[in-house]
Amino acid sequence: MLPRNPRATLPLSLLLGFALPVFGLRAQEATATLDTAGFDALAEKLIEEFKVSGMAVAIVHRDRLIHAKGYGLRDVENKLPVDADTLFAIGSATKAFTALGVALLVHEGKVAFDDPVRRHLPEFRMYDAVASEQLTVEDMLCHRSGLPRHDAAWYGAERTRAELVAALRWLPPTQPLRAKWQYQNLMFVTAGYLVERVSESTWEQFTRQRIFVPLAMQRSNSSVVVSKSDANAAQPYIERERVPFRNIDVVGPAGSINSSVRDMAQWVRALLDEGKLGNSRVFPASVIKTVMQPRMVTGRPRESEEFGHQTYALGWKVQTYRGHLLIHHAGSIDGFNANVALFPDAKLGVVVLSNEGHNPSTQVPARWVADHLLGMAPVDWVARTKKRSEQRRQAREKARAAREAKRVEGTKPSHSLADYTGEYEHKGYGVATIALDAEKDGLTFELNGIAGPLGHFHYDVFRLASGDREGLRVQFHTDLDGAVHALGIQLERALDPFVFTRRAGLNDREDPAHGPRDDR
């Protein structure tokens, strides 16, 4: 049964187990001053230990920017250093900007958090009819839509924002509406699209005019196209190896903002002072409090004894760190990592931006700063983070070995490789292309930017031999006449493989994965 009042939120005291108000957890004043030399040493250690190309850090305390500095290189090949104005992709830390934009429209009476999305987007449809009718604006912003990530539906897809929203009707959920927290990018894309329709501007224009400009975030932008042409933009790397920029403009509301730590410090100052920047009121205090009010328990295990149970607000994660309220969000996109952490009771905020993908080091500075400025015994977060990273690597290797153990040796494909080539379509995910690689006498795979050579696994099952989704398995299906007519791809672990049908035989009235559907 669905809650009668989807707008109702859980009080922080209940979610976190404290009988204290949102901005009143352990409200002690930090009295220590930043050990600049010690922090510089930490940053250099992170660069060395985690093979980080470069990073920039800003620390805000009591409405003052007390530290803004770059470390390492923004461009390894040309040995160009990072500084406080270097642009980085902030990834999913963008979600907090989109949530604030929606909250501003709510404050103005143009939208309500408990409005069904279809009130503002009449064409909106979900796979589930109940979710189509009842999913609210608030549901989208706190990841309780019932959908798993479905990231392959947008990652590299050449679609418009409207087309991505329209494709939601073909993406099945793994949970009922509001039953479980599941992180989801497409819902934030939809929220940004709603902002566009209500404000009669683009999400990019709205975000610039309503957030960037009032905060004097002059270097911030919403497109990698802009950043790539900037003389002081970081290049993307993974273990110091250059990777291509990833253009995710179409899913901008979920993660396309690029910024510098000096600009992000302005954002943090306003959030910590409940909407004020210095003596100026930039955002209503009620709006800031609203977006930081927890809505859902994430259900994730506590990282360690220092952390309380994690909840999710609107574009923010909320929990405690050693008794202090911590509001934070990370961000990651090809070659970039970011972390924004707020300790409201101490008026302390830390922003870390890095041009090193697939590394957890951006979480460490905020913890180090909190330990030192809030007078707590330091924890060796570098050692702990390295240990946890190694445990995750070992878990991935174990999972890979388990998959390999299921391989049946001595089998071969049932058809010639040429018979498998063609375009296969799923209405939610788009078109997967299988082609011949004449030079290597093999097959290649491409779906929304996920691309690479296909190696034979067993029978009619192949797997990606390299690329972003290395190891991804695909299975070719034949019809009763023996012709290859479909392709199964395991894109979500909690769901059966999605079936992509050869375009030549696709029935426009049929969902390739789940059979005929009506026009709801």
Image (cartoon, grey):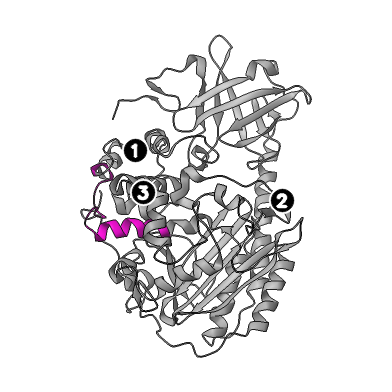
Can you give x and y, in whole percent of width and height, for residue 478 in the image?
A: 57, 17
Find residue 483 and name its label.
none
Instruction: Confirm whether the magenta stretch covers residue 13.
Output: no
Find residue 242 and name its label.
2
Whether residue 298 is visible: no
SS of the residue under disc 3: helix
Can you give x and y, in whole percent of width and height, for residue 220 in the image?
A: 50, 59
Q: Are marks 1 and 2 in contact (CB under 8 Å)?
A: no
SS of the residue under disc 2: strand
Residue most toward the top? Answer: 481
Position of residue 49 relative to residue 257, above or below, is: below
Question: According to the image, label 3 marks what residue?
Answer: 191
C-alpha span from label 1 to label 3: 14 Å
Which span is picked out in magenta? 97-119
Q: Which residue occupies 35% across, 63% down?
A: 291
Q: Which residue occupies 31% across, 46% down?
A: 200
C-alpha span from label 3 to label 2: 33 Å
Name the N-terminal-most of marks 1 and 3. 1
Position of residue 22 relative to residue 248, above or below, is: below
Q: How crowded is mark 2: few (under 14 residues within 10 Å), some or many (20 or more)?
A: some
C-alpha span from label 1 to label 2: 39 Å
Q: What residue type is labelled 3?
A: Ala
Question: According to the image, label 1 marks what residue?
Answer: 126
SS of the residue under disc 1: loop
Q: Quadrant of the C terminus?
A: top left
Q: Which amino acid does label 2 sit on?
A: Arg
Viewer-side label of 1, 2: 2
